[in-house]
Image: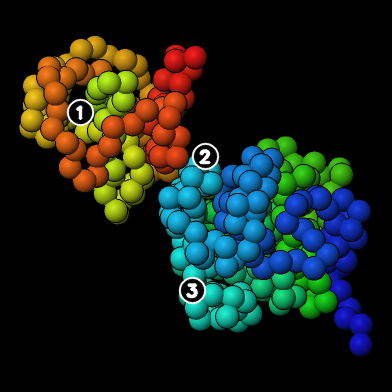
Amino acid sequence: MTEELHPLAQSLLQWYDQNGRELPWREEVPDPYKVWVSEIMLQQTRVEAVREFYHRWLERFPTLQALAVADEEDVLRYWNGLGYYSRARNLQAGAREVCNQYGGRFPEEREAALALPGIGAYTAGAILSIVYGKAEPAVDGNVLRVFSRLFCLEGSVQKSALRRAVEAEVVRIQPRQRPGDFNQAIMDLGALVCIPKQPRCHRCPLHLLCQAAESGRAAEFPQRQAKKAVPVEEMQAVMLCWQGRYLLRRRPKRGLLAEMWEFPTWPQAAAGEEKIANRLGELLRVRVTSEREWGKVEHVFTHRIWRMQFITMQLQGEPEPLPEGYVWWSPAVDQAVVLAGPHRKVAQRLLEEQK
Ligand code: SF4
């Protein structure tokens, strides 16, 4: 029996059939692995920025199995530039779990999908609806914006109450026949028409059904709480060069930029040039002296900003062999080393200086 579609779903799907975006991971028969990779890459990154990374990734890790058996360094290298490296690690851990527990096939059940590393309600809903045709909501920022406008839903986007209200509306309207297309249609509408600033209501297929458009209140939704000021941390990083190579240190296993390589860095308040020189001197068993400021780099994380001062230092003699967790590194030669975001900017500049 043909399902009677909600008028919103009908208009939206008609629009999607003609205007939906052509994206490399949208295939006639969607592949769960490809959809999974794309959804993780797209978190807080624009589609245009993701395309190139996605193609490179699939050339190197064409299947879930290829990702599961890959070396972690390699995985991080191919993620390099997308930020949030824990996503890449989770993706690989998830691939391994799917191989070990589900014979390499992404699970069809919501609970099983949610139990995989790095998979939250949005990603599970997106994969299950797009790949397996399950009627599951997939509520991300785009969907929150579109639905809060469609129904003039009050409440801050940062609060779970609004998310729950939107999920309930999606579940009510989502057609059983094309749930994945419905989810993707809202995402596309949010990206192309119901955009954050100045929504293009005159071009919107839902114009006549939209409560915010009807009452001229589209700009009021979604509502937001005032942003808290992001703390700024002053940091000092050392560029210690010996025989054309720089000293790098591996960051701890947990926490910010976990396990990535960096020019040794300390919070300014706890360090100071002299203390840092002494610490490095003890490490290398040779006198280290401070030279000059090389430059400044600002790096914005989600919850903090690092304002980093890079200082060059010099060795006054031959250093001892390095302990574990340190390497001598050359920007031109050792490109396989995965540098943490702010340090990558410096490496890029060093490479340009050497040209
Ligand atoms: Fe968004 Fe305007 Fe469409 Fe309403 S009519 S969904 S506010 S673009």
- Secondary structure beneath dot 2 equals loop
Of labels 1 and 2, earlier in sequence is 2
Q: Quadrant of residue 61?
A: bottom right
Between 211 and 184, the one lying in front of the other is 184
Mark 3 → mark 1, Cα distance in angstroms: 41 Å
Mark 3 residue type: Glu
- Secondary structure beneath dot 3 equals helix
The answer to whether residue 91 is left or right of residue 18 is left
Query: Can the viewer see residue 305?
Result: yes
Residue at image position (50%, 42%) is 80
Mark 2 residue type: Gly
Residue on which the image places disc 3: 97
Which labelled disc corresponds to residue 81?
2
Residue at image position (44%, 14%) is 353
Residue 55 drawn above or below residue 132: above
Residue on which the image places disc 1: 268
